[in-house]
Every structure is written in structure tokens, then in C-alpha cells.
Image: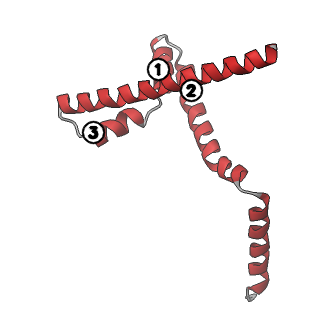
Amino acid sequence: MNAILWDVLCLVFFAVGFVIIFFSADGLIDNLRWIADKFKIHPVILGILILGMDPEECIVSILSAGRGLKYVAIGNVIGNSIMANTLCFSLPFLLFSQSFLTKLSQKLQQDKRTQIPT
């Protein structure tokens, strides 16, 4: 019975979290639109500047720099860049099926055999 209750509780927390994120993101976009109109900034530029940065990464870097923890701020930036690039380049390889990779390697081997040696 506890396992079923735990599963239901996890689903409820997931649904509540999803709703909070959905409305928070909607509010963020509405406020950015208001700021762009008020300061006469093009919304695309404001969107690139604000939404292009991870707000949580910026908060951690600003707080750590303000408290004199410059190495935490630098490590946060470097770690975020490493993780973003690693996931960006490795996830497509993990999502490809094995048959696609097998066909690709066979095609590459076939192309090697058909090349005229110079």
C-alpha cells in the first residue's frame, strides 16, 4: 500500500510542479514583453539577453561573486558550459538506434573500399 501511495504522491508533485513551471514561464514572458515596451527595446534582443542565460546559473554566479567566492562563480560557468556541450553532443548518439549506427559504419567501410588509392 505504501508503494502505491508513494507513486500517487510523486505523480501529484510532478503535476503541481508542471503547473507552477508553466504559469511561471508564462508570467516571465508577459513581464519581458512589458519591459520591452516600457524601455523601447526590441523583444527579440531582450529575449536573447534574458532567456539566453540560465537564470539559476546567473543567481549562483552573482551570489558567489558577491560573497567573495570567485572560484565558485568561475567553476559554475565552466561546469555549466562543459555540461551543456557534453549533453548537446552526446545525447543524439545515445538516442540513435543501434541499427542506424551499424548501417552508418557499414556505409563508411564500403566507401573506403570503393575509393581509388592514390
Using residue 44 as the reference point, say whether residue 10 is left or right of it: right
Q: Nearer the viewer, residue 9 or 117?
A: 9
Mark in front: 2 vs 3? 3
- Where, quadrant-wise, is the N terminus in this rendering? top right
Q: Are marks 1 and 3 in contact (CB under 8 Å)?
A: no
The tag on residue 59 is: 1
Q: Nearer the viewer, residue 1 or 70?
A: 1
The type of residue carrying mark 1 is Ile
Mark in front: 1 vs 3? 3
Using the numbered discs, state the Cα–Cα distance from disc 2 to disc 1 in whole angstroms. 11 Å
| Residue picked out by circle 3 | 43
Where does residue 15 sit, x and y in percent of width and height? 57, 24
Say which element carries label 3. Answer: helix
- Where, quadrant-wise, is the C terminus in this rendering? bottom right
Where does residue 12 sit, x and y in percent of width and height? 62, 20
Which numbered disc flags the more N-terminal residue, 2 or 1? 1
The type of residue carrying mark 3 is Pro
Which numbered disc flags the more N-terminal residue, 2 or 3? 3
Q: Is residue 57 above or below residue 90?
A: above
Q: Quadrant of residue 46?
A: top left
Using the numbered discs, state the Cα–Cα distance from disc 1 to disc 3 in whole angstroms. 23 Å
